[in-house]
């Protein structure tokens, strides 16, 4: 069973210090690309707005967001206007946080933002 952010708030279920499940998925379902590990915020059906006032979903799927991001993946280049289909999901994260692991793909692109702060 997948717990979304609001479900987690109601039940008290947290992963990685926040409510709801963190999932690992293939962007746009593509093989051979770096998977994304972000929180499943909620689920939409085909035709539902992707977010309040947003465009209709082209298909059913998860709306996702990184814990340190200000916007949903579907508003940006990670999964632009595409909910994450269930078949794109590789699994849910269940292990303890490993500091800076999420920074590895950023370092490879020359982005050192993870070291700031």
Image: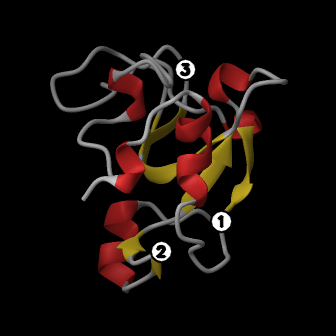
Which label is found at residue 93?
1
Which label is found at residue 9?
none
Mark 3 and 1 residues: CB-CB less than 8 Å, in contact? no
Q: Nearer the viewer, residue 13 or 73?
A: 73
Give the position of the C terminus as an image quadrant: bottom left
Residue 48: quarter of image: top left
Chain-order first, disc 3 or disc 1: 3
Q: Is residue 6 above or below residue 51?
A: below
Chain-order first, disc 1 or disc 2: 2
Furthest residue in direction bottom, as rendered: 12
Q: Nearer the viewer, mark 3 or mark 2?
A: 2
User: In the image, residue 34 lies at what x, y percent?
Assistant: 71, 33
Residue hosting label 2: 16
Q: Is residue 70 visible?
A: yes
Report how far apart the C-alphas of labels 1 and 2 lie in the structure. Answer: 9 Å
Residue at (38% x, 72% y) in the render: 19
Residue hosting label 3: 59
Chain-order first, disc 3 or disc 2: 2
Residue at disc 1, secondary structure: loop
Report how far apart the C-alphas of labels 3 and 2 lie in the structure. Answer: 28 Å
Q: Is residue 26 above or below residue 76?
A: below
Residue at disc 2, secondary structure: loop
Q: Is residue 3 above or below residue 27?
A: below
């Amino acid at each position: 069973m997948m717990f979304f952010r609001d479900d987690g708030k109601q039940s008290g279920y947290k992963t990685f210090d926040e409510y709801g499940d963190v999932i690992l998925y293939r962007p746009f379902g593509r093989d051979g690309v770096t998977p994304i590990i972000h929180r499943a915020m909620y689920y939409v059906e085909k035709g539902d707005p992707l977010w309040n006032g947003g465009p209709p979903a082209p298909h059913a799927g998860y709306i996702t967001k990184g814990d340190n991001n200000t916007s949903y993946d579907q508003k940006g280049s990670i999964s632009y206007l595409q909910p994450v289909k269930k078949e794109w999901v590789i699994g849910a994260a269940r292990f303890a946080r490993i500091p800076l692991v999420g920074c590895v793909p950023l370092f490879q692109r020359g982005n050192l933002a993870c070291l700031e702060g």
